[in-house]
Amino acid sequence: MAAHFGRRLRKGATTTAVAAAAVAALSASQAPGVTHAPSGESLEMVETTPPPGTPVTGNSPYYTDLPPLNVPDKPDASIDRQANGPTESGIPATVLAAYKQAEQTIAASDPSCRLPWQLLAAIGKVESGQARGGRVDANGTTDSPILGPVLNGVGFANISDTDNGAYDGDSVHDRAVGPMQFIPSTWATWGQDANGDSRKDPNNIYDAALAAGRYLCHGGRDLGVREDLEKAILGYNHSREYLRTVLSWFEYYKRGTHEVPDRTGVLPPGDGPDSAGPLPDPKPAPPPTRPGTPPSSKPTPPKPTKPGSGTTKPTKPPAAAGPARIEDAGTGTLTAMAGREFTERATVRVENAAGAGLPRQPVRFEIIGNTDARFPGGRTYIALITGLDGTVAAPALVAGEETGPFAVRAVVEGRTLPAVTFRATVTQREADKVERTGTEALTAAPGAEFAGEVEVKATYEGGIASGVAVTATMITSVEDPATGDKGPYFKDADGKPVRALTELRTDAGGLLKLPKIFADGTEGTFVLRLTTAGGAFVDIELKVAAPAEPTPTPTPTTPTPTP
């Protein structure tokens, strides 16, 4: 298939239409757990707003060639077949291993993200043609740096140098680097050491694939949800056409792929992303040999290049430069009433060994324990970036209805530094004021039912206090608030008299209407006390008295005449 090296400002409607057709043709095979579009709506037609901020690649160019419309295999085919299927579905062995390793690593640390390795493969395909067809050494490092065009604002983004040329060799402007095309400033935040060589190298496919996975998952994304999936891809390159192209390859790889030897992957014709001339010879490099030993029939994996040996790879930064610890940055007491927002926010500071705050460090806040408290949007975790002083505050938690203690844990993503754990508590709903809504007198004859009803309204700090627990008790007197044993009473489920009700709660409007009240044979004035969680109470007077005897009407008499 012919390949095209696309610049977003120059691609036309034809590419968009072809990409849309490819996605529509492949939309029958969604990734496990991906939420489908509504009936009649294709995946590529959903309008998703790109996330804010500079994209991973700085909106650099990408390969716009599309997969063939014939899928490589049926949906249940193995993805590990050797040298079978269409050429386009083959992924170089080391590159494929890096994608799968990144998927497994993130599945262990962030299972709720549901990152599929096929998504990394789709992005790697459009960004670098799978590391130029798998031209990597046994350690996963590309034969030569893969560099995007200079981001000087001429047809692309204008990004001034952020790494002093350490990664891209340009001390004036930045360039996207490596098989996953990270700009240096983004790599400074998301760079990973996934192959265990103590270096974070954007030109190493293991490091770059894990970094891409971490980025795609950040912010609490669930890539099994369509909206999160699309926002993650658009965060890589702010283009609807880019989204369609990546989704096309994503769907294609999910239908089946196979491993091919390194350096034999399909290469787009012409130059690579850096326009630095022809790609290296696609033939396998001769196996290295040691002086005095005969050549081996099996290639010996080359050792990683050490910093300072004339390579363009950056040297390992001084120990003080990277994160050394994460500390509590003055977080207050995390306590909130059920159903309300926490007033304090968990705040941390990431520092290097010298105690200086480090900006742009990814920090993950996670809720730990049995609680229904959540971050905004119903999230149980969220990933954020530290500010210029190295500090970052989690958004305010919202308490649920489950009361009791839990914890919030903060870690630096991609690091093994000790976490910071904050203790948090949700208390029961309270009211600081309760009052009766009616004013009519409450009276009853002995053995009768009280006329009128008792309704109260609870408030907290002037607002409605919904869901607040209330106790209603017939007390002996205001001076002696013990539960009385005579006088007015309620009835339980069996119709028996009870003089205290405890399982009462105000409704959504803060109102509570009591059940019917009855009088026994004792006359007098009694007190009903309603007490809320929080200590607010109101006393209501109840009178039990026999009806007054009617005054007899005098009978008129006829005067007796005097004789």
Image: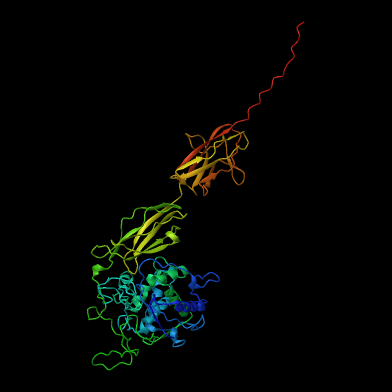
Relative to 398, is 315 on the left or the right?
left
Can see residue 425? yes
Say which of 274 and 128 sits in front. 274
Q: Quadrant of residue 147?
A: bottom left
Q: Between residue 499 and residue 295, name the one nearer to us.
A: 295
* Residue under the point 23% across and 91% down: 291
Looking at the rendered image, the quarter that the N terminus falls into is: bottom left
The residue positioned farthest toward the top in the image shown: 563
Question: Where residue 142 sits: x, y (%)?
Answer: 32, 82
Does residue 33 show up? no
Residue 91 to residue 515: above or below: below
Q: Nearer the viewer, residue 18 or 12?
A: 12
Quarter holding residue 264: bottom left
Q: Residue at x 39, y 67 (%)?
A: 218
> Does 408 sit left or right of 322 as displayed?
right
Type of colouring: rainbow
562 vs 1, left or right, is right
Q: Position of residue 119 (x, y in %)?
A: 43, 75
Vertical order, 40 against 534 (above or below): below
Query: 512 above or below 290?
Result: above
Task: Find residue 426 and report its horizontal and vertical position in percent.
Answer: 42, 53
For the view shown, which residue lies furthest in the right direction? 563
